[in-house]
Each structure stands twice: as structure tokens, then as C-alpha cells.
Amino acid sequence: MKKVMMGNHAISYGATLSRVQVISAYPITPQTQVVELLSEIVADQKLKAEFIKVESEHSAMAACIGASSAGARAFTATSAQGLALMHELLHWAAGARLPIVMADVNRAMAPPWTIWTDQNDSLSQRDTGWMQFYCQSNQEVLDSVIMAYKVAEKVLMPAMIVLDAFSLSHTYETVDIPDQALVDRYLPPFDFKYKLDVNDPHTYGGLTTPDWYMEFRIKMHEAMDQALVEIKKEAVEFEKVFGRRYDPVEPYMTEDADIVLVTSGTAASTARFAVDQMRRKGKRVGNLRVRTLRPFPFADIREHLKNAKKIAIIDRNISYGYHGIFAQEIKSALYGHSKAPVFNFIAGLGGRDIFPETIMNIVADVKKMKKPEQDLYWVEVKR
Amino acid sequence: MKPTLPLDELMSPGHLACQGCGAGIAMRTSLKALGHDTMFTFPACCWTVIDGPFPYSCLELPLLHMAFEATAATASGIKAAMRALGKDKTTICGWAGDGGTFDIGIQALSGAAERNDDIFYFCYDNEAYMNTGIQRSGATPYGAWTTTTPVKHFKKEVKKSIDDIVAAHKVPYQATASVAYPEDLYKKLVKAKEIRGFKFIHILAPCPPGWKARPEDTVKLARLAVQTGIFPVYEVEAGKYAQTMKTPSRKPVLEYLKLQGRFKHLKEEDVAEIQKIVDLRYAELEKRFQG
Amino acid sequence: MAKDRKKIEFQKLGELPPMVQSLRSMAANPTGSWRTLKPVIDPANCIQCTICWKFCPDAAIDWVDDNPAINLDFCKGCGICAEECPKKCIAMVKEGK
């Protein structure tokens, strides 16, 4: 069934179709509609789930950890400050190997107070052991929730669905809501082998000495490697059932491109539009969208950037005193594999729009330069 | 004589509690009442260590170790899952120390109490951060030495009244207990198990190293705390207070204080001050006991 | 979890569960070696009141055939049993004598 909906509601429908059993959430702009719709769906008994309306994001994640440990499919959604408040427990969820799925509406961090988008909130959680999927459409948001549970429950690692504040969260798009029967066929019920069980009691997460701590970290790392394999497998499986495909990276006209833009989130769909415009004028430009930041698709990135003569990475984030964070990641993937100069552009922080013209100007700038003269370029700033 | 408590043990020996640990008695007694259809979550606390290192545990019940401030919310999450999975009968317990309850975990505690989530919240209170080496907490009483309230600057603030804070949430059941009276604790838990909603159990659990007391005095101290009125033992059921261990003639607080090195620096006037604090608090409670 | 007294000896990564999970009881950890004083019950004076059993923080006193039996594999020698015994029939005796 097709319906016009905001990105936040796409999350709610994704969670509902995934038959989540415990929802625990705290309101934060711009995530609120996610939990509002879910509250209604649960109250109307259209979804058989427990909804705990907690007193903080920290408790939201704590309750998800409790619920998931007890064997329930658990869900939450948050943004920015809320995600930061959860930080400690993001490590906990991953370390406890709980396949919790969470939506994070990308909002810039305060101060100063802001509610608009950028990626510094989710990227600050990069090393917590959560998979991260950066979405570019409301359809992808809905689909990703379902796919994320499939992968997370296979490898026992949590997953974060990331969408831009307002440019997705509050933007209405046509979304195909898949049939419940199809989703049920695709996503089996969560059957957790390591759940809290009075008939087979175990303690989880107890004190672990240096003798074994590291080995459990290897296991997490290997689970993430396996997650990449599963994400690719599920891209195919999902397409078979639903007719839509989501790969860890999405190339667009990269094969013959002299300049390849690397983007994520909604900046990627803008970039594609800009690429079309530029192609019409005969410019050999392509775009590579990074959908999956963790696990990081090293090989795919190398493959799709191997023909690029110049690479322009647009980061809607900044690691102060360093570069954009996607730029760091991609440069490390290319090290020793590519001689193409890498240009890093910081754009759209705190919700500043990234227009097609913004991207075309970036390409024009890159065209003029042989190699980057600066470590990074701030885009459309008032100097 | 017949044992006054069930013989079944759901806590194995071999755990890592210090000699004479009050928290050990608190757990052992509680488990006898809670029984095998019970799950726990612990935050960081002495019991994180007592339980034992990977791959061991002294509990024969499912247990989820969790972050310091998350006890109540985690228990709420476990409960929600059990309800969703159709296993609503299982008793879900958060089990935290005083630091995890009075201080860092109070927000989650308040949240779960306000939502009236159907869980037990246990606070075994040894009146300081003992696991990290005896630092003062909101539960440390006036006059006590800790490593962060050294003798020269002993604790000048009174113990936070966590029971009143919980009572302000109008929870269906709450009780205080002392490890010196295991039958009283047992009875309260057996009763509370049948009550739906939030249950708060606050157990005074003396700590020999932290209180600088002899390990053999643990039970004696837990008893004196009640007999002096320092730690009145009562329950509140649907708002109605009842003193379950009566203390018609209270002993002077000095009898309790003098057995503990953490109070040995106190001068006569300090002891008098403590007596005053205790008397005031006791009078306040007494009014509630009398309805 | 079996009350197995055997220690678990993992050799390598593949033997571990995915997350830290307990697989044995702490009964594999005899804490009797912590003890410097050993409780000795004088059965002639014991009135089987169960007080020593009830207050043991270590579950190291078993109640066997209506009598307390101290499990010296685990008793840490705290002395609560001796202190609380109403008949004073438990003596704390120095270890190694």
C-alpha cells in the first residue's frame, strides 16, 4: 500500500511491520512523531508491544537492553542530545551483543541550541559497536528498519538507522508500506539463544579479567565483519521479496567519472540530481553514496573509486582539529589503493541547506585544482 | 527447632563478598523469599564483584549486569519483555547499592516508581561507595568518616531520606529491612511478591571494611541500627505505615556508633548531634506509624 | 547452571560464548583459604536454633539432619555464627593449630 508520509512515520511503520515487542523512548525534536505514531499504534492494539515511556534517553536504552536481554525485539528512536546521553549504554548494548534497532534523526549537537540536521551526533557514536545506516529517502528508512533487524539478529550486534532531521524526518514522500505477510516471511520472530531464562539461568556481562576481555572484543569485531557479509546478502534477499535494493555503498555514474563525489544521507540524493544536471552539460561527474558506515565497506569503496581522477567528499560533520569524518574513513580505505587526490568539503552543518548548486560549485572548484590546497574546504560560509 | 526460612539456597557459596558482608546476608535471605522464578539486574555495586568473575556466578537465577545508573529502567525493560512474551509471572528485580540508588540511579528509580512498573527495586545500603574504596554517598550518615570525608572534615550532611523520596511516588509497597531480622525481610518479600506495581525494599547491610567494624559484628550492628532508631524497620502499604520491628525503648546511638571505626573521631557533642538527628527523624516516623 | 565444583578452562576463542555469560557456579571457588579463624561447633551445647545457619553471609553453613554443619571449603571465618550463637557454643579457633 502506498502512502504519503514523513520520514518519522516511515520509522514507526518500519518498527510496526518488524513486530517489535518492546518500545522504550523519550521525546526529542525532531524525533517526536516516531514515538507519537507508535504510541497510537500500540494503544490501538495494532501492534502487540509494550511501550515504556521512560524519563530519559538513558533509561530508554537501558530498558531496551533489559528487554532485548529477556528475548524481546526492542526498539527506540532518538536524536542528538538524546543519543549522546545514551552513549554509555550504546557500548553496553553492543558489548552485550543485543540486536536492538534504533532510529537516530540526525540533529546537530548543542551548544548553541539547534534542532536542525548534521551528522555529528551519530558519528560521535561511531566506535560503540553499532551498525550505522545513513538513509536518503523515507522508503529507505522504512525498509532499513526491517532489514536492520534481520542482520542484527543474525550477527548479534545492534543497528542504528540514521536519517536527516527535517529534510527526511519531516518531509513527506510516497512510501510503499509492504504487506505484513511479506515482512513476516522475510523477518522471522526473534529467537534469542542467550536470553535471560529462569529454566536455564546464566549471568550476563559479569566481571571479566584481562585473560579474556580481548577475546570478547575480537568476537564483536568479527561479528561486524560478518555483518557486512549479511548486509550484502540481505540486499539481494530484500530485493527478491520487496523489489527494492540497498547496498552498503551506492555508485551513480562513477565508472567513467573524472570527479566522483562521495556523499551520504539526503545530500546524496541532491548530489545525484546535481550529477544529472552536470552530465547533461557533458561533465564527467559521478556520485558514490555511503549508506553503511559501520561495518565499513572498504572493498566496495575502493572498487567504485578506482577509476576516479579526483575525489570530492562532502561531509555534513566535522571532527574538530581534523577533517570531515567520512573523509577520514574514505582516505584510510584508499590509502595505498588510489593516487587520486581527495578533496574534503564541509557543508550543511546545523541544517544549512545543501542545494544542487552547492554541489555543482564544489565540482567546479575541484575541477580548477590539481590537488587540494587545504586539508578541508568550508562550503558557503560567511568569512 | 525448625528453620524459620526455607532451606533452598539460590546463592552458592564461594562468592567474593568480604568476610561478614551484610550484602551477602541480604541477598541470601531475599532469594529464599523470591524463589526460582526470579530475574535480576545489577548495576555497578559490590554485588558486581561478589557474584564472581567470568565464567562463574554465585546466583542460580538469570542476572543481567548493567551500568551504574540504569537499574530501575533495565528492570522495567526486562519486565516489559516478559509481559510481551507472555511470562508475566516471573518476578523482576533490580538490586543496587546505595550509590546506585540514592545518587547516580535516582532518576531511573524515580521514573520506574512514577510509572508504577511491576518490579522490585532493592537497595542494599552499606552507606558509602564501598566497592570503589569507601567514598561518601548520599546514604552516608552524618558524622561518618569515608575516604572522601576524612576525619578532619567528616560528613556534615545527614543521610538522604530515600524512603521518603520513594514514598512521594505513592508506590503500592515499600519497606525497610535490616539483615539482623531475616524473618521480617522474608515476610515482607513474600507479601510484596503478590503486589502488582512498584516495590521498593531498602535493606541496611553493614560493611565491615567500610564501617571499620569487626566482621563478626555485622548482625549486631544491623540490629543496633534498628534498636537505636537509626534505621527504623517498617513497611508502607498503599500509603499506610506500619513499624514491623518495634523499638519501645530505644538504645542510645552511642552503642551503635562505638562499634565502628568510621565514627571513632566523634566528640561527645557530635554524638549528641547524631542523637538529635535520629530522635527528630524517629519522632517524624512515629507519627506516621500511629497513622 | 550445575553446582559443579570444577573450574572451566577455556583454551581458545572458539570455545567462548558470543558475550560474557556465566557457565558455572562460584561453588568452583573454595573461599575457605581466606580464613584465619575457624568456627568449631560444640554439638553438646547446640540447641539447633538455626541462628548460625540463617546469618551466614556465605551460605557456608548447611542444615543437615536438624543440625548445623560448617562447610570449611567455603567458610571465610567472619565469626558471625559464633557472635550470634545464643548458647555461645561456636568457638573461633586459629587456623593452622
Image: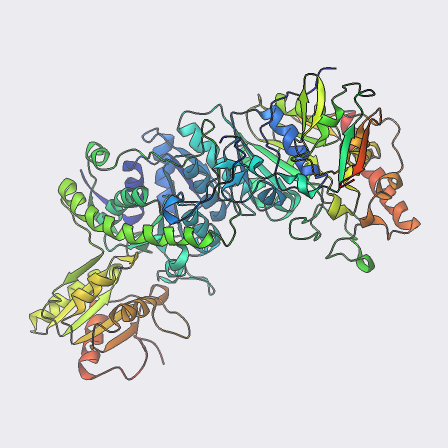
The quarter in which the N terminus of chain A is drawn is top left
Where residue B175 sits, quadrant-wise, is top right
Does the image show residue B202? no
The quarter in which the C terminus of chain A is drawn is bottom left
In the rendering, at what x and y percent does residue A51 appear? Answer: 42, 35
Where residue C49 sits, quadrant-wise, is top right
Give the answer, above or below, for where C9 lies relative to B150. Answer: above
Q: Nearer the viewer, residue A158 or A361?
A: A158
In the rendering, at what x and y percent does residue A265 appear? Answer: 27, 59
Left or right relative to A176: residue A211:
right
In the rendering, at what x and y percent does residue B201 appear? Answer: 65, 32
In the rendering, at what x and y percent does residue B254 appear? Answer: 88, 41
Residue closest to the far right: B268
Residue closest to the far front: C97
Left or right relative to B27: residue B212:
right
Residue closest to the far top: B1
Does the image show residue A249? yes
Give the answer, above or below, for where C92 lies relative to A165. Answer: above
Residue at 73% x, 48% y: name it: B210
**Colouring:** rainbow
Left or right relative to A131: residue B127:
right
Residue at 44% x, 42% y: name it: A65
Where residue A252 sits, quadrant-wise, is bottom left
Q: Nearer the viewer, residue B147 or A59?
A: B147
